[in-house]
Image (cartoon, grey):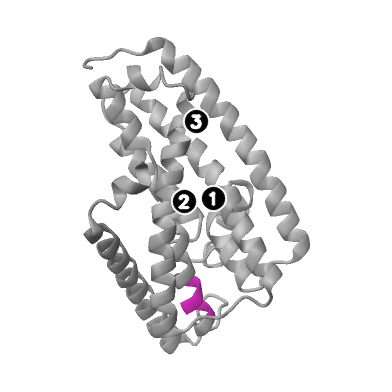
């Protein structure tokens, strides 16, 4: 139902896709200018950097889109009383909504990838195994981002607006996942911190697996790290939600 909601207006698809292509144009133009001036693109060749930002723009919706505002809105208008009575649990209900958004994000991302590949050309994965591992890491990142969304959305039980928290969540993920710039361009302390936090694995790591810049032993560590972070964030989200639900005050509905 959530996927159909996004596809009611066909212009949504074209506008989202056009927006992604514009982002790629801007990123590539900036890095080509830097490369022409300095002869360096953060340790990447210019073709790799083009591929990097095509892939980043293709998959970043998986990390940045979320159901936070939907949760906050349902709390404000009283719709949450029906959601809590669903046959599905509250987490299952919103995970389904989240999967619908991810499905739409995939369609947009795939269209963006095809169009950008035809315009600029990209570096293909060094082998099929790397391609599958990159996809696996992206999929493992979906529960991680979902539980972060649930934590942020639960703030809506205590506040009339989570807009600030929503912006904060997107900003942190954009910086630490390599959307703004590759992690290797940041100071050492930042790179060390990114190795601990789960955000790097959402975008930067799968893109580098695609480019063949991550060893197999490191990929195994990445998978284990994502699973552990997923479990940890689930526990935090569940405990936070169970505490918040006891203090709910519905002003509508």
Of residue 5 and residue 225, the one placed in the foreground of this image is 5
Identify residue for label 1.
Answer: 199
Q: Could you say which disc has been placed on residue 114 in the image?
A: none
Q: N-terminal of the two: label 2 or label 3? A: 2
Which residue is at a point 42% across and 21% down the rendered structure image? 86
Q: Could you say which disc has been placed on residue 63 in the image?
A: 2
Q: Nearer the viewer, mark 1 or mark 2?
A: 2
Q: Report helix, strand or loop for mark 1.
A: helix
Q: Residues within 10 Å of mark 3 (few under 14, many from 20)?
A: few
Magenta-drawn segment = 48-52
Residue 41's place in the image compared with 231, above or below, is below
Give the CA distance from mark 3 to mark 1.
23 Å
Give the CA distance from mark 1 to mark 2.
9 Å
Residue 45 in magenta stretch: no
Residue 83 left/right relative to 39: left
Q: Indicate the position of residue 113 as horizontal and vertical percent values.
A: 44, 71
Residue 29 left/right relative to 53: left
> What secondary structure characterizes most of the magenta part?
helix
Q: Residues within 10 Å of mark 1 (few under 14, many from 20)?
A: many
Q: How many labels were placed on the picture?
A: 3
Q: Indicate the position of residue 204 as horizontal and vertical percent values.
A: 55, 61
Q: Residues within 10 Å of mark 2 (few under 14, many from 20)?
A: many
- For residue 188, say whether it is visible: no
Residue 50 in magenta stretch: yes
Q: Could you say which disc has been placed on residue 92 in the image?
A: 3
Which residue is at a point 51% across and 66% down the rendered structure image? 182
The quarter of the picture where residue 120 lies is bottom left
Give the CA distance from mark 2 to mark 3.
19 Å
Q: Report helix, strand or loop for mark 3.
A: helix
Q: Marks 1 and 2: CB-CB under 8 Å?
A: yes
Which residue is at a point 56% across and 27% down the rendered structure image? 236
Residue 41 left/right relative to 163: right
């Amino acid at each position: 139902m959530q996927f159909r909601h996004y596809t009611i207006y066909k212009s949504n698809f074209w506008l989202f896709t056009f927006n992604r292509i514009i982002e790629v144009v801007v990123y590539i133009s900036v890095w080509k200018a830097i490369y022409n001036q300095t002869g360096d693109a953060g340790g990447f060749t210019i073709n790799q950097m083009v591929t990097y930002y095509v892939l980043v723009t293709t998959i970043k919706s998986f990390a940045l889109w979320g159901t936070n505002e939907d949760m906050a809105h349902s709390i404000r208008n009283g719709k949450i009383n029906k959601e809590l009575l669903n046959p599905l649990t509250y987490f299952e209900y919103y995970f389904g909504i989240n999967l619908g958004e991810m499905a739409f994000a995939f369609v947009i991302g795939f269209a963006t990838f095809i169009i950008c590949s035809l315009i600029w050309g990209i570096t293909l994965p060094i082998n099929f195994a790397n391609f599958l591992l990159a996809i696996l890491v992206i999929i493992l990142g979906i529960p991680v981002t979902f539980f972060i969304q649930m934590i942020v959305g639960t703030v809506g039980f205590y506040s009339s607006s989570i807009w600030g928290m929503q912006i904060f969540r997107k900003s942190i993920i954009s910086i630490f996942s390599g959307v703004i710039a590759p992690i290797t361009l940041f100071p050492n302390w930042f790179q060390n911190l990114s190795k601990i936090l789960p955000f790097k694995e959402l975008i930067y790591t799968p893109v580098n697996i695609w480019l063949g810049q991550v060893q197999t032993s490191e990929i195994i560590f990445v998978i284990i790290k994502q699973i552990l972070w997923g479990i940890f964030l689930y526990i935090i989200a569940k405990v936070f939600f169970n505490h918040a639900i006891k203090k709910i005050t519905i002003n509508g509905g």
